[in-house]
Image: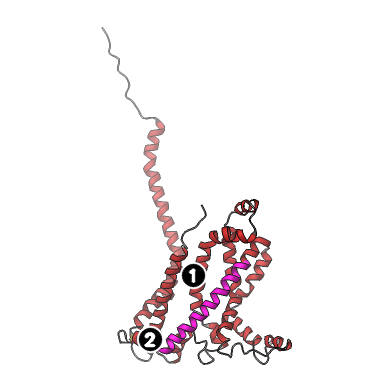
Amino acid sequence: MTIASSSPPSRLPLGSAEGARTKPRADRAGAGENRGDGRLAAVFIAPALLGFVVFLLWPTLRGIYLSFTRFNLLTPAEWVGLDNYARMVHDPIFWDSLTVTVEYVLINIGIQTVSALAIAVLLQRLTQSAVLRGLVLTPYLMSNVVAGIVWLWILDTQLGIGNEIISAVGADRIPFLADETWAIPTIALINVWRHVGYTALLLFAGLQAIPGDMYEAARVDGAGEWRMFLRITMPLLRPVLAVVLIMTVIGSFQVFDTVAVTTGGGPANATNVLQFYIYGAAFGRFQFGYASAMSVALLVVLSAITVIQYRLTRAGQTDLG
């Protein structure tokens, strides 16, 4: 008689069975950790988000609403529709202030960008001294108000040391902040002096990201410093330079404190920049609705300029492979 042999039932390996049993538990543990990380991230983000809503988002929305009203703090806001914007279009002082602001921006951006780029390249090519970088940044540590007051004393027509030096060399004293021709260029140069170090360090950081072997290869091929600057430095620095230009233009259009402590918008409205005119309309004549309309117009102008700059300079793209 033949006895049929039966094979034992197949089993999964012990390790596979344990893995099958522990995998759901591991998934649950990972999901719990993710939820914990999300809560921790929310805790850290909450203060910044609260500050953004309270000090930026809400005032912006409130200002847009007030731009369609007549409001003077003493009476409730009265809805007037587009009256404030119509008044702005026909306001010659508004357009004059905008022209003065554009003049200031062009002078400030042109001189500051060229100077900062030159300083950044010199810092990279000649020295890596942290002490020198700190000295370059020193003016930026001073507030705009203090810088304005210091330069107001230095450039004073009668007692300022700047005009004393000019007089000592036999030239006529120059009313830097009291003359319509000199006032805006002088204010622009004061702010260039304060901000150029910070801008230079931003560009210096961008230069640090450019691989050094590119310069070595170009030098082996016989390229000089000027050729390397045009063919290597500028193309590869373009994204950083574009972002710096966007930041500088936005900041320049919002110039206020230097004007307030040096010229007060004078002489003869020669330095009555747009921010100073908005301030005067709001807190000098209590025309908060009209001031809000001008602020909204400035917001639209800056947004349009930023978008155009971003697209023209291809700030979101880099030539580094």
Magenta stretch bounds: 90-119
Q: Please say if 268 is above or below 38.
A: below
Judge whether residue 127 can be spotted in this image.
no
Q: Which residue is mark 1?
A: 246
Q: Main secondary structure of the magenta part?
A: helix
The front one of 185 and 138 is: 185
Quadrant in the rendering for residue 282: bottom left
Kind of residue indicated by mark 2:
Met
The structure residue drawn at horizontal position 60% and vertical position 69%, both measured from the top left corner, is 116
| Relative side of 118 to 16, left or right | right
Task: Determine which of the numbered discs, if any, sits on residue 88 in the image.
Answer: 2
Kind of residue indicated by mark 1:
Ile
Residue 299 percent across, percent down from the top left = 41, 76
| Relative side of 107 to 14, left or right | right
The front one of 123 and 150 is: 123
**Circle 1: element type:** helix
The front one of 302 and 6 is: 302
